[in-house]
Amino acid sequence: MAAVGRPLELHDVRIPPVGDRDILVKVKAAGICHSDVHYRAGVSPVRPLPITLGHEVAGVVETVGSSALTSVRPGDRVVLHYNVTCGDCYFCSTGNEQFCPRGLMLGHFTDGGYAEYIVVPARNALPLPDEISFEQGATLMCASATSFHALRKARIRAGDRAAVFGVGGLGLSAVQLAKAFGAIEVFAVDRKEEKLELAARYGAVPVNASRNDPVQEIRRQTAGRGVDVALEVIGRAETMHQAIRSLAPMGRAVIAGIGNEPLSIDTYRELLGGEAEVIGSNDHLLQELPQLLEMARRGILDTSRVVTRTIPLEAAAINGALDALERYEGGLRTVIVP
Ligand SMILES: [Zn+2]
Ligand SMILES: [Zn+2]
């Protein structure tokens, strides 16, 4: 990406030097994410320019820096954790590296995976089990990991009922993970019938918000009680409000959808009356990824139907995929396979 608001361009870029604690990875798959649409459009600032986008990356280790303390070796299949952090500051040391003041997100603040090669700190690489394809591995590193973190923030427990507002890439993982964490019933709320059908195949109760008021529908199907956990992954005030209004007493609404609309709630009826909690959730942690990958390896989390298209590492194809995402078209997930 050379300039904000312009199509991405293909350039020959020198492979950066591999530091002592880095690894060089040959990219095998790079997911195209809705965030990349925001970066290209300038909705979310990207620096420094020019930059290589791509934060959902899987590949094969090419070389390992001389003092990299890592279990991965040349030839190993890996996925990359996209938050490159210092590892030493207060937040990194207390297990909350997403707040690292020196943190740089791949493909956002440092060169990412829309490339043939990428250099990252060795600690950002995790072994990718053979059972998981590179394409799926790449998308696990964003949408699935973010829903995993959001459900942990929700303190979801066995026996809970849950609702997921928005069943795209994030939501489809959230439905499966909520069940794996012990939810006895998961409602999937969306307006698109084909997404709801897919969510239903993963065991969710579909609620079509274009036909019914989802809050009323969830209350009707839970004998008026509501859900213990509601996860919003769309980023709109209306759906955030619906998530809060669908809560049972002492329910937790986790907001993980990125948007900038102000949210207004009835503080007595919707917040303190039922001791509801509204929790923000952003990104995910390196420490969560081994468990997520193991769940995917065992098929507890199946994202095989999420990657709907692969494209080559070509500017026209990538811009076309970003254009389609901008219009909310083009299937669930497109992955670049260089
Ligand atoms: Zn992403
Ligand atoms: Zn740090």
Image (spheres, grey):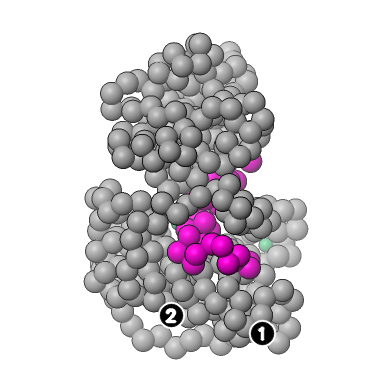
* Quadrant of the image containing the C terminus: bottom left
Horizontal arrangement in the rendering, residue 109 relative to residue 81 (left or right): left
- Along the line of sight, the residue nearer the viewer: 212 or 257: 212
> Does 187 appear above or below 198?
above
Q: Name the residue under label 1.
A: 65
Q: Which amino acid does label 2 sit on?
A: Glu
Tell me where residue 50 appears, x and y as whole percent: 38, 75
- Along the line of sight, the residue nearer the viewer: 6 or 184: 184
Q: Pick whichever of labels 2 and 1 is earlier in the sequence.
A: 1
Tell me where residue 24 appears, x and y as whole percent: 57, 81
From this viewpoint, which residue is outermost toward the top?
A: 223
Query: Going 40% across and 18% down the picture, which residue do you hit?
Result: 217
In the rendered structure, which segment of residues is drawn in magenta?
Answer: 126-153
Q: What residue type is labelled 1?
A: Gly
Checking the image for residue 135, the label placed there is: none
Q: Name the residue under label 2.
A: 116
- Along the line of sight, the residue nearer the viewer: 109 or 154: 154
> Does 276 appear above or below 123?
above
